[in-house]
Every structure is written in C-alpha cells, then in structure tokens.
Image (cartoon, rainbow, N blue to C red):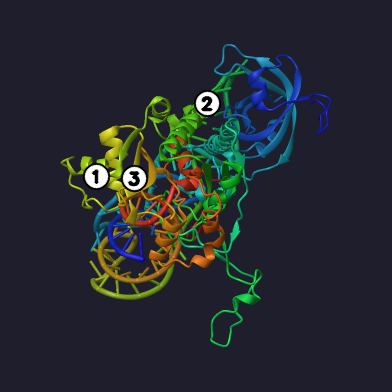
RNA sequence: GCCCGCUUAGCUCAGCGGUUAGAGCAUCUGGCUGUUAACCAGAGGGUCGCAGGUUCGAAUCCUGCAGCGGGCGCCA
C-alpha cells in the first residue's frame, strides 16, 4: 500500500469538478469526498465518490491486492468521509471517461450503516426534510443549493450592472409594514414575569429598546427612504412572517429581494421586474445546465423546456379590469365568484397563466380597497398602480407598485385605514421634502427557486426551513 | 385559521375484519476475474404513529390526540 499523502501532501489534491474539467491523466493525486456507493467483486472494489463540487461522481477502483478487502468492507459504506490517493487513468471503453486507481485511502469519518439514514437509493423529499442536516449529501440538494447560490449572485450582478446600490435595511424594527402579515415580537423581558404598569399593560419602557420591537416583514419602507436619496437601491435579506400559513409556498423566515427606484413609474417597474426574471432564468440555463438537467429528469419533466420558453416570452400584461373581464367570459365555473372589486383567487390566477396566456402574466391596476396603503392612487381613484407577476406552477412571484408620493393623499388614506401615523413619521416626511415619483417590488427568493428547480415545496429550496410549528 | 388525505421493517410501499404481517431496496453472511441502481444464494430485522372503543377476532372499523403531506385563505 502506498504511503498516505496526508492533509499537506506533495501530491495534487483536486475537487472532482476540477478533474472533469481538465483531467490530469496518468498523474498521482489525492481526492477527498464522501462515499456514495460501493460495489465489491472478488479482486477489487468500486467506490463512487462525491465531494459536492459537481453532481458527477468519481469512480475509484480499489484492487484488493493494494487495499485489503476486509478493510474496505468495514470502512467504505455509503456516507463515509475519506481521502483516496492513486493514479488517474483514462477508461475510454467504460461509461465514465476516467477513474482513480487507488493505492490507499484514509478514513476521515465512518458512517455506520446501521444508523446512517441515507442509502444509495433515492429518498423522498418528505423523508429528507426530517434530516435537513444531511440534505447537502444528496445530489438533489447539491443542485438546489448551488442554484440558490448562483441565483443570489446573479441578482447582485444584475442590479450592480445597472447602478443600483445594495442597501441593508434593519432586521429589528419598531413597526409593522402594514398589511404584510403578523410579526414576531422580539423582547428581553422575562416571559414568566413580565413587568407591568399600574394599569396592567406591559411596561415596554423596561424592554431592551424601551419600546416594542419586531422582526422585519419587509425592508420596503426603509428602502423607499434610501431610494429618495440614492436613486436606485435594492435590499436582499431575510424577512419574517408569523403567519400560520400551512402551504408549500410559505415560510416564516424567507429571503426577499426588494428594489426601490426613484423616478420609476409603474410601467418602467414592470419592465424591470420582467427583465430581471428573464435574466435570472438565462443565468441558470447558461451556468447550471447540469443541475437543471438532473432536476428535470428527477422531478419536473417540463422544467428545461419551460425555462427555455419563459426566458424568451413576452409576459402578458393585463389590467385587473381586463383580467376580470377575461375570467367572466371564460365560461369556467370558479369556486369563488369573479366580480370587479374582489381579489383574484388562486384558481383565477391559475386560469389566466396556465390556460389563457400559457406564459407568465402581469396583472396591474388593482382596486384600491384590496391593496396596501402605500400604493399610488390612479387618476380613476378606484384603482392603484400595483402589479403582481404570476408564474405557472407557483403563482405570485413578485408583488410591487408605484408608491404614493403625494403627502396629503397618503396621509388621508392611512388615516382612513385607522393607522397610527406617529409610527410612520419618518416615512411620511419623505413626502414633505422633495417627494418624487418612485416604485419598487418584492421578489421572493424561494418562490423564484421553485420555478428554477422544478420543486414544489419552499421547504426544499432553503437549507434549514422555518415554518409554523417546524424548524427543519 | 378552515377542509381533505396519509402514518405498516432503516427507506419506498403492498396488505383494508379471519392462520405465524409481505415485497423491493438497504443491512449482515457467503459467492462472483471490471462493477455502473452490479449480480447470485442465504440470514436477521415489525409493540402495523399513540391512547381508547366496537368485535368471537382489529394493521384493517369507530373516536380522540400527534406528526407529516395536500387544497383553500393570507401573502413573497
């Protein structure tokens, strides 16, 4: 058996991705990774080694006259972490282009087959959710998390290429961004013995900030303030909603991209949203064909074709009024009635996207009454300059609007909704000093990833999921 | 929050009132001159989610609870 090269050995130590990119055939080298499978015959064993650098595995041949069979059978089970060294040899007559003929190996960490949960067969996504810490050992999650990483990078690249400033809005906030769901309260007060005032209410002046504090549900309001000086900004960070939504599309902690642009009207903002989404799809197709092909084969047969079609398609733009009209004339029977003034239900959105348009749809100019206070009132005074981007399979992926920049109008509408204006003093003040038209939107990273990966549950596109009653 | 479904071996599932509960894969043992989800032979492995109830008899029917999944609502 050859001498162990060790961690700082004078031999090549390469990732498997490097080997496939430019195989150093004939050279002696060391590779590190985890055993995916092992097959043993009388004279030799075969190990498929993966290291996370690529979905492809490296076949390692272990001749039993080099490495004792008993040792291999005791050590090299699925999941074991090892370093293997030997010579890289071309194998033109075999399914793989080359393989490593081992001289020896070092077992970093065994994986006892009696207790190691993963096997070499495919597991259900539901089962893997129970052992989230091992999901990165599977090719599915390597593909998904690599796409997540790459899409995140592409988002930054897209905005930076266009002069947007990446801003960090606070995670801890004193107030709600109205209409964005329930908040997680953050406190250092002892929950077992909360200090109270004479009238029995909680004495928040004794809390850490001297007032109630929450985890942010959106960076939008702060983003608007930053855009009113920097021009074009975007946020990209975690947001938190304490809404007990039990669906495959909701998380309590998720990542959101929120651009906010001074001097943008609704149409220009819709253009930006559409362009961004197509850019991200093109980026994934160009840089991650291997991952997308794998996910297409495993999970969503139409994934590649759908991405190809979407990156070229012109999203269909319909005003809310047009959309209601189309639904009313569709001849379809919907569970929820279609009438002007009611919000579009999931079944309505699905009809518009999957049957009527058969491509992404942007619905804009929604009734004022069903949308948030900060959306700009249109001249008809019945609708606001809001829009949703609806995708096949996953529904709403972006929600945005032109913001109400007129001080008196904004104030009046907030009052009409019974909001406490004192909590929004800074926000309102931006409308008193040099207020200009501006717009923005929110893109849910996990929902985008459902579209890019072909998976159907957002718990599977974030490494460790947090949802009502679940911390994966 | 409302509605529906599922829970049987390590995993994926079959069994849906009637002998000692099954299969494939995994594991273990042995075999195999290069395997590719290797193959061949054999073995071990189960309080049938939990708690009650109905019945001569319950994995199977009923009730409650829990976990998971899905639909709806809310939204990203």
Asked if labels 2 and 1 touch by Cβ distance under 8 angstroms, the answer is no
Q: Indicate the position of residue A220 as horizontal and vertical percent values.
A: 52, 51
Question: A138 or B22, which lies in front?
Answer: A138
Residue A365: mark in rendering: 3
Residue A382 in view (yes/no): yes
Q: Indicate the position of residue A12 as horizontal and vertical percent values.
A: 77, 23
Most distant residue in the left direction:
A331
Q: Is residue A224 above or below residue A100?
A: below
Q: Mark 1: few, some, or many residues within 10 Å (few <14, many ≥20)? A: many
The N terminus of chain A is located in which quarter?
top right
Residue A190 in view (yes/no): no
Mark positioned earlier in the residue sequence (3 or 2): 2
Q: Chain of mark 1?
A: A
Q: Chain of mark 2?
A: A
Q: Indicate the position of residue A383 as horizontal and vertical percent values.
A: 32, 49
Q: Residue at x 42, y 29 (%)?
A: A307
Q: Picture quarter containing residue A394?
A: top left
- Of the two numbered discs 3 and 2 in the rendering, the one whose residue sits closer to the viewer: 3
Q: Residue at x 40, y 60 (%)?
A: A413
Residue A168: mark in rendering: none
Residue A324: mark in rendering: 1
Mark positioned earlier in the residue sequence (1 or 3): 1
Most distant residue in the top direction:
A92
Mark positioned earlier in the residue sequence (1 or 2): 2
- Say what secondary structure mark 2 lies in: helix
Q: Picture quarter containing residue B51?
A: bottom left
Alpha carbon distance from label 1 to label 2: 41 Å
Instruction: Indicate left or right for A40 with A397 as reference.
Output: right
Instruction: Indicate left or right for A32 with A229 as reference.
Output: right
Q: Chain of mark 3?
A: A
């Amino acid at each position: 058996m050859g001498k162990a090269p060790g961690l700082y050995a004078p031999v090549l130590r390469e990732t498997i991705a490097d080997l496939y990119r430019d195989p150093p055939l004939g050279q002696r080298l060391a590779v590190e990774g985890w055993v995916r499978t092992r097959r043993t015959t009388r004279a030799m064993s075969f190990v498929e080694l993966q290291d996370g650098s690529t979905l492809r595995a490296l076949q390692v041949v272990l001749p039993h006259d080099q490495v004792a069979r008993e040792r291999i059978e005791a050590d090299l089970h699925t999941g074991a972490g090892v370093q293997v060294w030997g010579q890289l040899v071309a194998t033109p007559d075999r399914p793989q282009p080359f393989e490593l003929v081992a001289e020896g190996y070092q077992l970093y960490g065994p994986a006892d087959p009696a207790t190691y949960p993963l096997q070499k067969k495919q597991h259900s996504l539901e089962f893997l959710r129970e052992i989230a810490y091992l999901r990165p050992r599977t090719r599915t999650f390597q593909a998904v998390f690599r796409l997540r990483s790459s899409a995140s990078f592409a988002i930054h690249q897209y905005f930076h290429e266009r002069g947007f400033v990446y801003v960090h809005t606070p995670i801890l906030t004193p107030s709600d961004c109205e209409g964005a769901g329930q908040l997680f309260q953050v406190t250092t007060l002892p929950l077992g013995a909360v200090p109270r005032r004479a009238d029995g209410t909680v004495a928040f002046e004794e809390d850490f900030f001297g007032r109630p504090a929450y985890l942010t549900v959106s960076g939008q309001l702060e983003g608007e303030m930053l855009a009113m000086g920097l021009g074009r900004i975007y946020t990209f960070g975690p947001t938190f909603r304490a809404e007990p939504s039990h669906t495959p599309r909701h998380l309590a902690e998720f990542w959101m991209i929120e651009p906010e642009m001074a001097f943008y009207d609704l149409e220009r903002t819709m253009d930006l949203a559409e362009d961004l989404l197509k850019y991200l799809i093109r980026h994934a197709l160009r840089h991650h064909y291997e991952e997308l092909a794998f996910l297409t084969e495993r999970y969503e047969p139409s994934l590649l074709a759908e991405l190809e079609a979407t990156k070229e398609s012109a999203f269909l733009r319909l005003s809310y009024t047009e959309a209601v009209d189309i639904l009313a004339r569709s001849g379809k029977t919907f569970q929820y009635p279609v009438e002007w003034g009611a919000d579009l239900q999931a079944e309505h959105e699905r009809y518009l996207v999957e049957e009527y348009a058969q491509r992404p749809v942007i619905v804009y100019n929604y009734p004022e009454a069903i949308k948030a206070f900060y959306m700009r009132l249109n001249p008809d005074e019945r609708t606001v300059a809001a829009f949703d981007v609806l995708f096949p399979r996953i529904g709403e992926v972006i929600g945005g609007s032109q913001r109400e920049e007129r001080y008196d109008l904004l104030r009046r509408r907030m009052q009409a909704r019974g909001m406490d204006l004192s909590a929004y003093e800074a926000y309102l003040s931006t409308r008193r000093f040099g207020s200009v038209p501006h717009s923005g939107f929110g893109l849910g990273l996990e929902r985008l990833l459902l579209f890019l990966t072909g998976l159907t549950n957002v718990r599977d596109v974030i490494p460790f999921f947090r949802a009502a009653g679940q911390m994966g």
